[in-house]
Image (cartoon, rainbow, N blue to C red):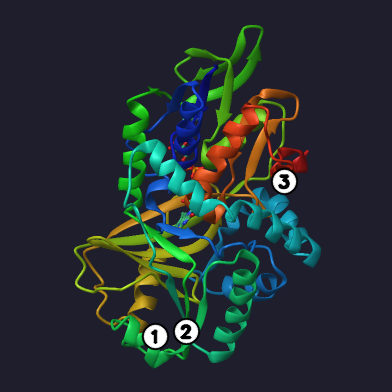
Amino acid sequence: MAHIGIVGGGIIGCATALHLLDRGHQVTIVERDAGGLPASVGNAGLLAIPGIDPIARPGMLLAAPRWLLDPLGPLTIRWKDLPSLLPWLTRLVLASRPAEVARARLALTFLMNTAAADHAAMAKLAGISGHIRKTGALKIFDTLAARDRAFAGELENARLLGGYEVEKLDADEARRRVPALQGTFAGAFFNEGYQTFEYPLTFLRRLQASIRERATFIDAAVSSVAWTAEGISVRTEAQNTHLFDKVVIAAGIWSKTLVERLGLHVQLETERGYNTTFVNPSVTLEMPVYFGEHGFVATPFENMLRVGGAVELARPDAAANYARAAAMRKKMRRYVPDLPEHGGTEWMGRRPSTPDSLPVIGLHPGDPRIAFAFGHGHLGLTLSATTGRHVADLFGGKGDPELDAFSIRRFQ
Ligand SMILES: Cc1cc2nc3c(=O)[nH]c(=O)nc-3n(C[C@H](O)[C@H](O)[C@H](O)COP(=O)(O)OP(=O)(O)OC[C@H]3O[C@@H](n4cnc5c(N)ncnc54)[C@H](O)[C@@H]3O)c2cc1C
């Protein structure tokens, strides 16, 4: 069995650690901010099985100019960062061609088909249970035309994925199911395919606690990963070197720098998202509610309500603009007038996104001792257990041929 180092202790690094421990490997996670609040703890907490549509789609390109006119709308670009984003945006446009969209949907379907079962199996590895609820989700719309367009797409996804129902609802029926929706909207649908995790911070901390019993955590920022005669070396910013038989790069958006230092290229940029979390909120939602035309979602957790989403294309280290979180609260009050304006905690997180919406899961083309597990965009929580299983299989020499779609080779 090998000693395997994992760079990054977010949801992807932790899911990978659990699978490698299960295969009998010795595991060390190198994490620079174990108490931090990365994407893995601030997300919307959804097991988003129906989410097989890549972000690059012809309809998205048509809607983008209108969205970009509203600086606090569902999609914004930090114009100062445009030059550095241009190569990614160019590839995004190419990825929106129908054949590419179909390819991405099939590839995501392959991962999604096992996502729920992989989470159940991973929970056993971590010794946890009761952390996912079969809630479904409601999507509400301002016009029936928008509802019907989205409904047709969701039906098609349900047909591809199987195992859940999608139900068209009028506004009264939606309000009967979620009475807090007292504002005006035209219609909705209920998608049974969504499930809700416990509070994402709690989930990650429970996984980390289980891993800590059997693996080592090193508190350090990794500056590079390199080959040496003795193994794969992980060098930290404090100039320490740790030597492993194999290494997994699972550092979210920050994986890009480490990959480039290994002589490879990857198109990875940050789709930043914002949200507000209310503790013991005065308003109750019976299930997650997506605000269809506004690009955000409200998720109820045990004693919390989280409202957020949207996409801001910007450099990862650019200053946060929390007016975006306030804008989503304001929009939500149109539909849920009882949502409080104050008292919530605002957060900004960085989705590590590729232009084709496919994560990078695979071995280094020149050295099978290095694996990549990053770039999960909007789906990292959903696909974490599946990714961890595949990385463990790849290191065991049993990689599924369907994983070729996720190889870093596509960016070379
Ligand atoms: C607003 C929002 C809502 C979302 N909702 C959902 C959802 O409902 N469902 C879903 O499936 N997904 C959702 N996502 C996406 C999901 O959160 C991400 O895809 C996922 O968390 C990415 O996990 P990760 O482990 O790759 O990255 P991260 O969570 O960013 O973790 C990376 C870790 O690596 C560490 N690190 C980085 N660089 C170094 C270094 N050099 N040395 C040491 N450590 C390092 C970081 O400190 C961090 O802990 C959402 C994201 C956002 C922003």
Label 2 sits on residue: 188
Q: Dots 1 and 2: beta carbons under 8 Å?
A: yes
Please identify the quarter of the rendering in which residue 304 is found. Answer: bottom left
Which one is earlier in the sequence, the residue at label 3 or at label 2?
2
Position of 206 compared to 407: left or right? left
Which one is earlier in the sequence, the residue at label 1 or at label 3?
1
The amino acid sitting under disc 1 is Ala
Q: Secondary structure at mark 1?
A: helix
In the rendered image, the vertical position of residue 198 relative to residue 412, given as above or below: below
User: Can residue 141 be seen?
Assistant: no
Furthest residue to the top?
230
Label 3 sits on residue: 402
| Residue 308 image offset from top left, x and y in percent | 40, 64
Label ID, residue 174 = 1
Mark in front: 1 vs 3: 3
For label 2, count other residues whose C-alpha is less than 10 Å away and answer few (under 14), some (14-19) or many (20+): many
The amino acid sitting under disc 3 is Glu
User: How far is disc 3 from disc 2 in space, using C-alphas?
Assistant: 35 Å
The amino acid sitting under disc 2 is Ala
Please identify the quarter of the rendering in which residue 259 is found. Answer: top right
Mark in front: 3 vs 2: 3
User: How far is disc 1 from disc 3 in space, using C-alphas?
Assistant: 39 Å
Q: Secondary structure at mark 2?
A: strand
Tell me which residue sits at (52%, 41%) in the image.
252
| Residue 203 image offset from top left, x and y in percent | 34, 46
In the rendered image, the vertical position of residue 34 relative to residue 287, given as above or below: above
Q: Dots 1 and 3: beta carbons under 8 Å?
A: no
